Amino acid sequence: MKNELVSKYILVCDDDPMARAFTVRVLRSVSHFDTSEVGNGQRAIEMILQKMTSGHPFHLVLIDWNMPGMTGLEVISHLKKIEEMKGLPFIITSAETDSEKILEVLDLGISDYLKKPFEAGELLKKVERVLGQRN
């Protein structure tokens, strides 16, 4: 259980400032989560690459599916083309309810799907599960 005390770096990317603030607040309530936040897909790519090259990569990215400019799926697709990014887990968040679309997304190698609106406990459960798979 030693790994549970090691800080985990999580990026939250959502164009909705209220959703982003809620997610960050919940994650910061857990002492071993360090978070960064961005409001668009292009900035997410920049920050993920910057953290990787600094030697302190993110352990997880929570990203909104539908954002203007660059969707969460486009961000993930772009990053998965980079060898060092292939193992980075993503949880995609969305109000999407079409189960076929959700299954298609999960088939792209996304770690999990979190339906909006979500509760704090549901968010933490999924984050802990995905991070636990990496230990």
Image (tube, rainbow, N blue to C red):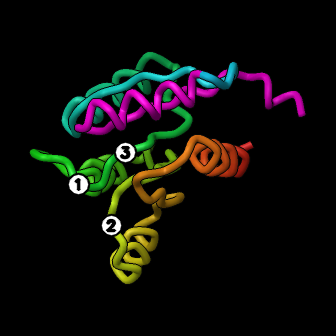
Location of residue 128 with respect to 111 vertically, above or below: above
Pointer 3: what residue? 63
Pointer 1: what residue? 66
Query: Looking at the image, which is closer to me, 35 or 28?
Result: 28
Tag 3: amino acid = Ile
Q: Which of marks 3 and 2 is nearer the N terminus?
A: 3
* Residue located at (36% from left, 72% from top): 97
* Residue located at (87% from left, 28% from top): 2
In the visual, does 22 lie left or right of 121?
Answer: left
Using a 10 Å C-alpha cutoff, classify the residue at mark 1 as few (fewer than 14 neighbours), some (14 to 19) or many (20 or more): some
* Residue 22 falls inside the magenta stretch: yes
Q: Give percent across and percent down for residue 67.
A: 19, 48
The residues tagged by marks 3 and 2 sit, at their Cα atoms, a distance apart of 13 Å
Tag 2: amino acid = Glu
Mark seen at residue 96: 2
Tag 1: amino acid = Asn
